[in-house]
Amino acid sequence: MKTVTIPLALFEKNRLRLAHSLKSHSLAILHSNDEMNRSGDQYYPYRQDSDLFYLCGIEQEKSILLLAPDHPDETLHEVLFIRKPDRKLETWEGHKYTLEEARAISGIRTVKYENEFDAVMAALLMYTENVYLNLPELPKFIPELPNRNLRLAHELKLKFPAHKYERLAPLMRDLRTLKSDEEVALIREACHITRDAFLRVLKTVKPGIMEYEVEAEITYEFVRKGARGHAYQPIIASGINACALHYNANSKACADGDLLLMDFGSEYANYAADCTRTIPVNGSFSPRQRDLYNAVLNVFRFACSQMKPGNSINKLHAEVCRRFSQEHIKLGLYTAEDLASQDKENPLYQQYYMHGTSHFLGLDVHDVGSKDVEFRPGMVLTCEPGIYIPAEKTGIRIESNILITHDGNVDLMKDIPLEVADIVGYMSNQ
Ligand code: GLY
Ligand code: MN
């Protein structure tokens, strides 16, 4: 798999920004993700913790980053710990970072092996008042088994109960929601690779093709273009399968006359793209499918036009839901009278549009960021309205990735075909 070299200036800048947001006499501790065992000596593919990666670019397991920006010993302002390479480990798993390599990737001068961690911690804690711990905070995503950050936080609090402990997550969230130019360039590349995969799919799809064959075409294009693979489990959903929002069995045949919803995005240098396109399996939309598709496209265009400084995910979503109510009436899903007398607790639009319109995008596909924070230049979000009508065996979603700018936004996926005529045109040229 291609390794992408990211200029270390990005990680240095990120550490500096974090250092500015810490209280004085602080120590921030970030652990890498655990390796997740599948069975025996087999592990699920390793993916670095996004916060640790953001601050030092280190992709190796069992790494630890300590930041103590105003410690009297300047060599301890930034300390990175890595596993000590050993012959047996490298015989099985291949090369592990040397100290010099880890320095070159991260720009951190003080890189040590993990066996020195306790001694360095002792020296740092002497001068530390606040210890920032990087713990998961959203209750529904707190892992059932404590991760490395949680386990070592418990240990530390037992050994050093008199220190003050602080939350790192809100600081990381605020830093990561604003993307620098280097990050936007990496997201753009993830989007370009995603576009290439979609163009490939447009040449391949025809009645009878299996959903997993479409997935395989996408995977092939991702990997050959230098992406690590998918940024998330791809959703390749034909016909009624598209009404299950996170369907990813991808196991059915695509039938003549059905639509095919594909929600897929490459992961490039750990940055995600998140695209959804919906196409007719046989290359042409029926009149009803075209009306449904254009209704979603209208709302998509409207939503994109509202993604500008000052708006927020929650405000955008409320406006989009109001727009959808009008489109639903035009499509005959309910009447204006039904709308006027709807139960406000269970609005009618929710029967056909039951997910959010937008989320932040970056190192994670559902990247950190609050739904109430005002959009600012440098934020990258998705725009993803959809319509789901099980009675018509149809689900349609259109999703692109939007960079907020001073005067509006840039659609990072504007070269991924969207209009009915473009999709039909590409498919007829198979
Ligand atoms: N790409 C899947 C989602 O946004 O939920
Ligand atoms: Mn999405």
Image (spheres, rainbow, N blue to C red):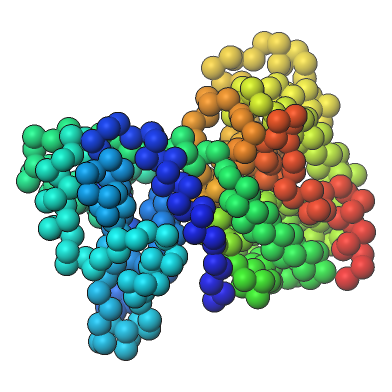
Residue beneath the point at 86% across and 44% down:
290
Q: Position of residue 14 (x, y in %)?
A: 46, 46
Image height of 321 relative to 184, above or below: above
Q: Is residue 48 left or right of residue 335?
A: left
Quarter location, residue 360: top right
User: Foreground: 98 or 262?
Assistant: 98
Q: Position of residue 395 (x, y in %)?
A: 69, 46
**Observer able to see residue 313:** yes
Q: Is residue 289 left or right of residue 250?
A: right
**Observer able to see residue 50:** no
Q: How many marks?
A: 0
Furthest residue toward top: 341
Q: Position of residue 225 (x, y in %)?
A: 67, 71
Q: Is residue 42 left or right of residue 25?
A: right
Q: Position of residue 168 (x, y in %)?
A: 33, 38
Image quarter hosting the N terminus: bottom right
Image quarter hosting the C terminus: bottom right
Residue beneath the point at 92% across and 59% down:
425
Residue beneath the point at 33% across and 35% down:
22
Residue beneath the point at 61% across and 30% down:
376
User: Foreground: 208 or 159?
Assistant: 159
Image height of 17 relative to 372, above or below: below
Q: Is residue 366 left or right of residue 326?
A: left
